[in-house]
Image (spheres, grey):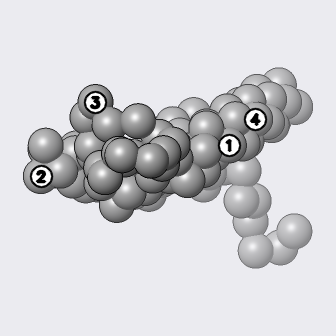
Amino acid sequence: MEIVMSILAGTLFAAGVYLLLQKQLLKIVLGTALLSHGAHLFILTMGKLNRGAPPILEKGITEYTDPLPQALILTSIVISFGVTSFLLVLAYRTYQSNKTDMMDQLRGTDDE
């Protein structure tokens, strides 16, 4: 299971980096979102995937799931959702004021 999750995380990282290198703002925002989802899967995979094991260690239970990666991922999901929303608003506002979302045109000329 960890191999499948690692491949999926790597695919999300690759797609996220590819989208970050594009010239449109919306693709850059989507690349940021994909990178954050790849990081979530990476953290979850590093915490080991123990299915059916309780997250709390009690007497008599020798195998348990570490709840720390899950807590980190929940916090990260909220933060990445907020960052993605903020980036979408910034991209929309930039498009409204400049009538373009191409980075080449937003960069301006050397004289400015």
Tally of marks = 4
In the rendered structure, find residue 3 and report the number of the disc placed on it: 2
Image location of residue 4, percent across then percent down: 13, 44
First in sequence: mark 3 or mark 4? 3
Contact? badges 3 and 2 (CB < 8 Å): no
First in sequence: mark 3 or mark 2? 2
Identify whether 3 is placed above or below 30: below
Type of amino acid under label 4: Gly
Residue at disc 1, secondary structure: helix
Q: Which residue is drawn at 28% across and 30% down?
A: 52
Residue at disc 4, secondary structure: helix
Between 75 and 22, the one nearer to me in the picture = 75
Image location of residue 78, percent across then percent down: 70, 35
Type of amino acid under label 1: Thr
Type of amino acid under label 2: Ile
Q: Is residue 88 visible?
A: yes
Mark 3 vs mark 2: in front: 3
Contact? badges 4 and 2 (CB < 8 Å): no
In the rendered structure, find residue 52 and report the number of the disc placed on it: 3
Residue indicated by mark 1? 75
In the rendered structure, find residue 82 and report the number of the disc placed on it: 4
Disc 3/disc 4 C-alpha distance (Å): 31 Å
Mark 4 vs mark 1: in front: 1
Disc 4/disc 1 C-alpha distance (Å): 11 Å
